[in-house]
Amino acid sequence: MVYNWPIISQFFRLPFPCLLCGAPTSHPAGACPPCLDELPRIPHPCPRCGEALGAPSALPCGHCLRRPPAFDALVAACAWAPPVSGFVGGLKFREQLAAARLFGHRLADMVADQPRPDVLIPVPLHARRLRRRGFNQAQEIARFVARRLHLPLAATHVRRVRPTPPQQNLDARTRRRNLRDAFALARPVPWRHVAIIDDVVTTGSTVGEIARLLKSAGVSRVVVWTAARA
């Protein structure tokens, strides 16, 4: 049996082992502050797509200037490197849900001083994959962000209506083709500013497709908050 020590210990108001070093901590993220500070970050991220730039800049990267993504901004809690990649894999494939708490708190800290969206929408799983996995890792992360920032969470507003093969082994063009018409709205969208929550963004094809869907429904600003940027 795998115990979710941060949740159990918070209930009993006891210290719990840091997810990274194992030292006792009572930090709500499930890791001690020194370990949180050592998680890999993206150096000088592009304000539009979140990819690393060579130096600080308020302007988007060249790729975003030539071909802007459908979303307006992306914030990543961490860079895709150990131990973050291990935590994402553990969350998705081994039900290590404590990682969702870690990423949720880290994301909330990263976006605390940004304009608040009207709602959070996690990237949905197709019903078949959701039944097989038993949970949606993006939704688990979004729960903690919503709780920390006191924001509503709309977990069923966007549906994945077409099952698609896993994206990780596909190139950018194939990913875009793979996701065409894969998402749909379950009902009209009443919001003007939406934050999409994902566990990891690689090419941005998935969140870009959802952003296009939301903007076609009248949303004026779509941002992406992700646990990791690959």
Image: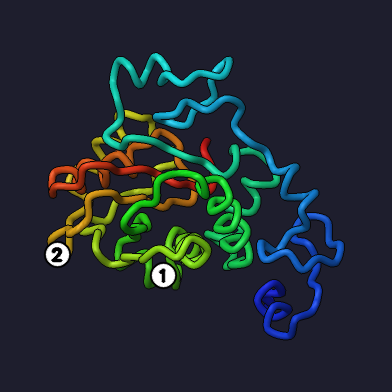
| Residue 92 % position (x, y) | 52, 59
Task: Report the disc number at residue 187.
Answer: 2
**Residue 1 shown left or right of residue 145 in the figure:** right
- Sequence-wise, the earlier of marks 1 and 2 is 1
The secondary structure type at the circle numbered 1 is helix
Inspect the image, locate mark 2, and give the three-letter code of the amino acid beneath it. Arg
| Residue 97 % position (x, y) | 58, 67
In front of the other: 112 or 85: 112
Q: Nearer the viewer, mark 1 or mark 2?
A: 2
Name which residue lies at 58% across and 55% down.
103
In the picture, residue 150 is in which quadrant?
A: bottom left
**Residue 19 shown left or right of residue 123 in the figure:** right
Task: Report the disc number at residue 35.
Answer: none
In the picture, residue 203 is in which quadrant?
A: top left
Q: Quadrant of the N terminus?
A: bottom right
**Residue 138 shown left or right of residue 164 in the figure:** right
Name which residue lies at 30% across and 39% down.
208
* Mark 1 to mark 2 CA distance (whole Å): 25 Å
Per the image, the residue denoted by label 1 is 132
Farthest right residue in view: 23
| Residue 35 % position (x, y) | 77, 50
Label 2 packing within 10 angstroms: few (<14), some (14-19), many (20+):
few
Name which residue lies at 34% across and 49% down.
165
Name which residue lies at 53% across and 63% down.
148
Above or below — where is 47 with respect to 148?
above
